[in-house]
Amino acid sequence: MTPLEIGLTLFGTLLGGGIIFWMIQVDGHFRRYSRDAAAERAGQSTQMMLLIDEVGRLSDDCAALIHTQPKLKGLISAHNSISGLEASLDSEVGSPSIREAAEQLLVAIRGMLATHPTDGDFTQAEEKPDSGVMALANRLFDLFTELDIHGPKNLGLTALEARRLGEIAHELGEDAWARACYKEVASNLAPGNLASMRCLATLAKDSADIEEEAHWVDEQLSQLPDDVELLRRLSVLRPETAERNVQRLEALGKATPADHSFVSGLKERLQGDSSDHSLAAVEAAIEQNPTIDQYLLKARIHRRREEPLLAIDSVESGLELPGGRQSGEAWALLAKLLCSEPKRLAEALKSAVHACALDAGGTEMILLKAELLEQSGRSEDSFEWLESALEKDPSNSLIRSEISQMHTFNGRREEAWAVIEDAPNWGGPELHIQKGRLLLADYDANRDAGHSDTDILSAAEATFREALESDRECGLAWLCLGRCQRLAGDIDEATISLNRSRRLMDDPMIAAEESLIAVDEGRIDDAARLIDEADITESKSLVIPYVKGLVAAKRGSLSEALDRFNEVLMVNPHHVRARLNRITLHLLAEDVQTALDDCDWLLMTYPNLLLAKLRRGEALIQHGIFDEAEREIRAVLQEQPENEVALTRLGSCLLAQGRADEAFQPLNNALNLNPDYPEGYYQRAMLYLEMGEADSALADFKTTAKLAPRHVDSLLRVAAIYHEREDFQDAEVAWRKVLDADSDNKLARARLDEVRISLAKTA
């Protein structure tokens, strides 16, 4: 054999031997694994038998438990039905049909309700549904929401089942469902069912639905006409039935002095009945059974009768009763009664503190406490108190508005804006009104600085209209809107808004605004009457003395007007309009130096206030310092070239300097800008006189008198021209017009006598 053949033979032998060896090894492993598998199967069989025995025992235990606890069967049935329906709704394959869903729901509901064997009256329930029922019920109501089911009408429940479902719904806080269940029973399934009507009345009471509660209480009384508690409850809900209900109680022999006192109290509150009969009824109730409520009712009657001291005594008597000092309502009423007594301010504050500590009086008492702290000279404490109240109730827009207003009064504009901008909601009108007030304050500040911004005024008006969209019956919003409209010159709309405000509330500031409108329209007597009306009830606002000053100035009572403006400036030196008016009064009184002092103060405080520069120019003209006066007036015209008042003053300044030719241009420009400006015609007439053109001067003086019938200087000039011309008939008429405008004018009276003598001689 060749070496190759020998090699191949050896290789084949080795390969065959290896394969045989491998097969022997595999066979050994296979046999071993077979033996292990057989042993494992035997072990598993034994374990399975043990598991079957255990499951059997558990099944027997469950059966025994269900037999001993029948409720569990219903819960299990309900759980299975709900789980199946939940799985069907969550499945991507498809939702169940309406029929299948209804069948599963009915099984679930009945299974659950079967475990809660009550009458379904939660007002008299002795036991609450257990936690298992509540957990299932919670899942069930989630299913109702997914299936868009909002009531039991089509569920096929019996009256008892519907009541039980309503009870469980109430326990879960699903009062809408509870109401629907009980209404279904009371209206369709079992009309007149007392349990359902009791529950409906309670649900209405919890939701503060007085009409609904009264309806169901009345329905109960139709079946139980002698029920004392129902009669008394209906008296509270429907005051118009109280007297009849008490008569029914009297017929039953169940009426008490407290019932008669209650009726008297209702009459006092609803009809303003402050008769001795009401008071006697309350006193009889107090004599039999003194309570804090009876003493408070007695105090309210005394307050209605305008007997504040007796009202205070009544509240204090109630507070002396056992537990009376824990009555927050009593402390709140005492604070309201004492706050109008200047000598008892400390007691009023103490009462307000007690009331607030007992959470009585609401927002009104919180604000009253702040006001009393302010009146006691504790401004910082007042502010801190309001801030702490706002921290507890950030959504209280009344408190937030008051804090913002306090910032405004103290010159903290940015803080005032920040407070209202941080409000979590703007649901009511209060914050809109405060925002409008801040915008008006900005408008006033700009106007006082000589830069009236109509955009700000428009924004304020829009804000007050937003407040009215929130509450059309808000008198304060109408008042503020009326002020905006007056400032914008829309007098007719302002009058309408103020009339609406007056119908909705009694506020002296309405009369003050109406007085300002009357001043603008020249109705001085009406303005005086209105501002006097406001002054009766409002003593704090600077608007009152300011308007009184305007009225006095219009009537020619310059000293009274000066006193009023001084009064305003003593309290608020930065009241620009009052100071400008005081400057005018000083100029009329020829107290030029004082007028210049006021002008200098204004220009130091408000360097860009053009009106102050103009007034200073007028004062300098009157003082004979014409060069400086001209500079001031030209500075105004550089900013406002079309200011007819400044143009007229420039003309009079040039005329006073003997520069008549130059004076014509500014005067003519002023009249071109405003053809109805009487002072422009008067100054041009003076210019014509200076130039010897008497006819032209007479025409302009007449135009001045026509535009301003009480312009005494122009009337005097007209009369003097006629008198010098010896035109005595026209002169007589002219002098009479002077006396009509100024009955105490001695010159006019003397000249009129001269004219009459001259006419008599020529007759």
Image: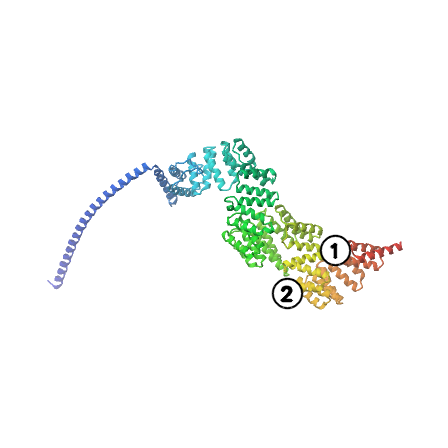
Q: Nearer the viewer, residue 287 or 238?
A: 287
| Badge nearest the viewer, 1 or 2 | 2
Report whether residue 167 is seen: yes
- Left or right of residue 76: residue 29: left
Disc 1 or 2, which lies upstream in sequence? 2
Q: Amino acid at mark 1?
A: Ala
Q: Please rate how many residues cluster around mark 1, counting C-alpha atoms within 10 Å: few if below 14, some from 14 to 19, many from 20.
A: some
Q: CA distance from mark 1 to mark 2?
A: 35 Å
User: Residue 708, which numbered label?
Assistant: 1
Residue 663, percent from left and from top: 74, 65
Could you say which disc has been placed on residue 604 in the image?
Answer: 2
Residue 231 tag number: none
Q: Is residue 157 visible?
A: no
The one nearer the camera, 174 or 251, is 251
Q: Amino acid at mark 2?
A: Met
Residue 452 in picture, x, y percent from top left: 63, 59
Residue at x 75% of width, y 61% of height? 683
Q: Is residue 421 left or right of residue 530?
A: left
In the rendered image, the residue lying farthest to the top is 251
